Amino acid sequence: MTGSFFFPELGPATSLIQTIVVANWGREVSCECLYDPLGVARPYRLVFRGCRTLRWSVIAFEEDTSDEPADVIDFVPGQPHYQQEALITTDQFELAILYDKVELHRSE
């Protein structure tokens, strides 16, 4: 995951996105994730606040994977205060978010 330097506590292993919730008419985007799904599987949540732009592209796939978590292929965190959008690329979709701030909430 390219953006792990942005959240050094996540480390270099991959993550899975289990759920994405868009709230407040798109001003908040919350991604429920699992870090290192092949090992310890620590849950965490990325919350983008003050979102101005969301671009969602579904990647064409042949089988129904709607109940399966999305494997994060790349994460570019962008820059807060609307300077550069974050880009989350998975095996099922790509999501670009222009945001004011992002928070990482770890579950123990």
Image (tube, rainbow, N blue to C red):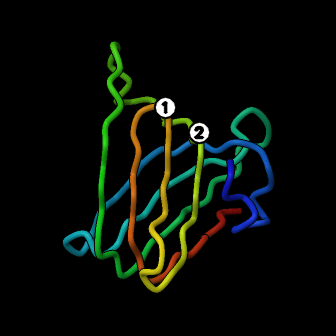
Q: Residues within 10 Å of mark 2 (few under 14, many from 20)?
A: some
Q: Mark 2 belongs to which amino acid?
A: Ile
Height in image: 71 above or below 6?
A: above
Residue 88 percent coordinates (x, y): 49, 51
Residue 93 percent coordinates (x, y): 39, 39
- Residue furthest to the top in view is 62
Residue 18 percent coordinates (x, y): 48, 44
Badge 2 or badge 1: first in the primary sequence: 2
* Callout 1: SS: loop
| Picture quadrant of residue 64 | top left
| Direction from residue 90 to residue 63 in the image, left or right | left
Disc on res. 102: none
Residue 57 percent coordinates (x, y): 31, 42
Residue located 41% across and 76% down the image = 99
Residue nearest the viewer, comparing 33 with 88:
88
| Direction from residue 3 to residue 65 in the image, left or right | left
Asked if the residue under mark 1 is in contact with the one under mark 2, i.e. CB atoms within 8 Å, the reply is yes
- Circle count: 2
Height in image: 5 above or below 70?
A: below
| Direction from residue 8 to residue 33 in the image, left or right | left
| Direction from residue 24 to residue 38 in the image, left or right | right
| Residue wearing tag 2 | 73
| Picture quadrant of residue 61 | top left
Residue located 57% across and 41% down the image = 72
Which quarter of the rendered picture does the C terminus lie within?
bottom right
Residue nearest the viewer, comparing 58 with 66:
58
- Residue furthest to the left in view is 25
Q: Calculate the distance from the C-alpha at mark 2 to the C-alpha at mark 1.
A: 7 Å
Q: Mark 1 belongs to which amino acid?
A: Asp
Residue nearest the viewer, comparing 27 with 19:
27
* Callout 2: SS: strand
| Residue wearing tag 1 | 91
